Image (cartoon, rainbow, N blue to C red):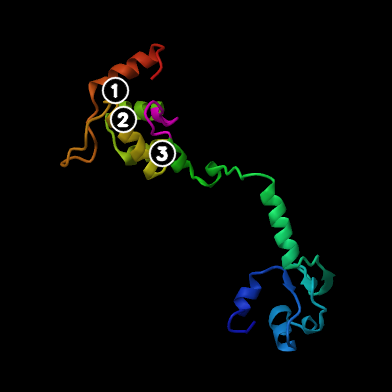
Amino acid sequence: PSVDVITGLIKANFPARISFRVSSKVDSRTIMDSNGAESLLGKGDMLFLPPGTSQIVRVHGAFVDEKEIAKIVEHIKAQGKPEYDTTITKTEEEMSDADDLPGRRDVLFPDALRTVVSNKSASTSLLQRHLRIGYGRAAAILDAMVREGYIGEMDGSKRARPILQKAFDDLQEAEEGREL
């Protein structure tokens, strides 16, 4: 490591430091701000600088060589095929986009329809403000409203979409007990 790569600013942002064996005292001082890492034994021997102290501790971590890692990987692979849960990496907006399939609606659709009808206006910014959602989700809800015949297509001269009579009728029926 060089001082050009591991700058003082970088070191200041790491509360703890670990150093394995290095080739020179200069490298040790670059990482740990003191000598010592150059005389470590290797294979898991390391220096540890805990956060909030200036006392370096010599510790020994487990050393696992490449052959052993390969054996572990093969053992895990032999256990069966992985089952990935792709929903873990999706955002809320991506999850709501998946609900855009025929017959499925965003959970906020009824609230969005009430908002649109009560404000007599249908725009993404209105839904964003009233429902506290992002642009993508608001736009997807409006697209679903267009598909289902609650609001009209965008008119180039106006910012808001026209609300169709079906929206008023279905909302009235929903208030009388029928689901939207």
In percent of width and height, residue 65 lies at 75, 68
Image vertical order of residue 18 relative to residue 76, above or below: below
Between disc 3 and disc 2, the foreground one is 3
In percent of width and height, residue 142 lies at 32, 35
Alpha-carbon span between mark 2 and mark 1: 9 Å
Image vertical order of residue 60 relative to residue 35, above or below: above
Quadrant in the picture for the C terminus? top left
SS under mark 1? helix
| Amino acid type shown at disc 3 | Asp
Q: Are marks 1 and 3 in contact (CB under 8 Å)?
A: no
Q: Identify residue for label 2.
A: 145
The stretch in magenta equals 99-109
Question: Residue 97, labelled with which disc?
Answer: 3
Quadrant in the picture for the N terminus? bottom right
Q: Identify residue for label 1.
A: 167
- The residue carrying pointer 3 sits among few (fewer than 14), some (14 to 19) or many (20 or more) residues within 10 Å by Cα, namely some
Q: Is residue 129 left or right of residue 22?
A: left
In percent of width and height, residue 168 lies at 28, 20
Q: Are marks 2 and 1 in contact (CB under 8 Å)?
A: yes
Query: Of 129 and 90, which appears nearest the observer?
Result: 90
* Quarter occupied by residue 33: bottom right
SS under mark 2? helix
In percent of width and height, residue 20 lies at 75, 75
| Amino acid type shown at disc 2 | Met
Between disc 1 and disc 3, the foreground one is 3
SS under mark 3? helix
Query: Of 142 and 54, which appears nearest the observer?
Result: 142
Identify the residue at horizontal 77%, vertical 65% (top origin).
64
Alpha-carbon span between mark 3 and mark 2: 14 Å
Classified by dominant secondary structure, the portion drawn in magenta counts as: loop
User: Tag 2 or tag 3, which sits nearer the N-term?
Assistant: 3
